Amino acid sequence: MQKTSSLILLLLILFLLACKNKHSTSSQIRNNNDSIIVIFNNTAKTTQKAIFDFYFQDSLFLGGPAYLGFDTVRVKTTEPIFLIHADSLQTPYLMYPGDTIQLDVDKNGSLYFYIKGNEQRSNEFAFFPLLIKRTGILFNLFNRTSIPNNVNNLYALQTFYKATDEKERGRLQILDSLHKNKSLSDSFFNIAVSVIKYTALYNKIVALALNQRMLIQNNKFQISFDSLLDNIKELPFSANYMCYYVLSSAAIMPIDKYSASELKDLNDLKKRLDFIVKTFEGEQRNFLLSSQIAKAIIVYHVRVPNETFKLYDSVCTSNAYKQLLYKKLNNQITVSDSGKDNNLLSSDLKTTKTLQKIFSENKDKMILLDFWASWCGPCIAEIPHLKEIEKKYPQNKIAFYSISVDAKVDDWRDAIYRYSLVDSNSYLLLNENNASFAKKFYIGFVPRFILIGKDGKIISSDAPRPSDKALQELIEKNL
């Protein structure tokens, strides 16, 4: 009786969430099915220009930030992805290419997503927050206090495994009930099943790693790992973040002394690829081969020879993954020293311009330089405030330039698209380490705003941020 009442309450909450979302009046923005669009409404007016930290994992398990709270944020993707709230709960939200999603904050300050006129998708956005509220955190990459660490006996670990299995069954029962009730679509149901099952395996893998010393002392580690590996291989591959975490952890534990250490060199990569080829099959193998090579090159800057790519081409059976990997690698233009001082790359990726050229093009104008990076949360938080200031002043009075210090061109270009920056005013500093301007004013520390007067002299080399009224006062004083 108690379980039935709890389930009815859960369904009621989902229904109420879907109903209250109908009050939004925000305009529709066209989506061409190659992106996810998130529109922030803040109808309750409970927050003032707050930026909410999210992140996602793409199909190659290469994570990226997505800061929500702007009027509109766009995330490029041709595959369904989870946006994960980067707070203590790590709540995931499943989003599809072509989705135009509303984000709002209720009177208690809690976030919720919905799609106007689509009650089922709105219910799906509410599912994981309610599941976490009912059954606890799915997983936490940064806080593992709920997982036993350095226990003294096998019984404690086995007890945790049994509790994990029981929690998995309970979560699947809740999911199944809502699916039968038609609150959730078939596609969402299938992905959610995979997330729940892979979540249980991930928590077991973490427990295995945290208690490896005890298991090794009892000659139980290898048999425990092999048993867990069998369970992983039995699960069908699913393109979701929990599947990526589980497979990647399982693939590197035996190579890296049962811990997820960094990939140090080509020899490490070869060991991992060899283990993957011998151990995994099908899409699990295709994903792992592709993601490990991508991470080696993009994250760890390992020089991968042609022979490794020949091996990859011969054992990876997925043309889709091959195309995805090579497209990703081809887009990874790295920033290099052009030989010119203070050189900037235009957003068209062809034109370069020096800071001196910008100064000469804007004689008799005030100039505000915004030095930022795609990975810098405080930088992103200033963008809405900067846009508001730009609207207040005519172009013949003050020029605004956003100059990124990103290490990779692709990261910078994605951020320009994601946060709707003006292409013509956006540049990438190509030679930050050698640029005399960057050295003189310590530009490596971002966000950084520099205000230059109409006479070409620097008014402030560390101007107030746009969110601070003092910046507008400074502009007005010198305009």
Image (cartoon, rainbow, N blue to C red):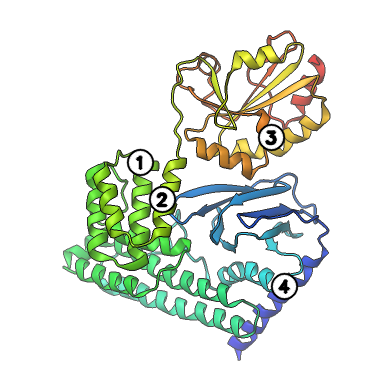
Q: Residue 325 shows which numbered tag?
A: 2
> Marks 1 and 2: which is nearer the front?
2
Give the crowd class for mark 1: few <14, some 14-19, many >=20 residues within 10 Å.
some
- The mark nearer the N terminus, 4 or 3, is 4
Q: Residue 422 shows which numbered tag?
A: 3
Q: How far is disc 1 from disc 2 in space, using C-alphas?
A: 16 Å
Tell me the residue at 59%/41% (across/down): 415
Residue position for label 4: 119
Give the percent coordinates (x, y) of residue 386: 72, 33
* Amino acid type for the residue under numbered disc 1: Tyr
Q: How far is disc 4 from disc 1 in space, using C-alphas?
A: 43 Å
> Marks 3 and 2: which is nearer the front?
2
Residue 118 relative to residue 315: left or right: right
* Amino acid type for the residue under numbered disc 4: Glu
- Identify which residue, 332 or 105, lies in the foreground: 332
Q: Secondary structure at mark 4?
A: helix
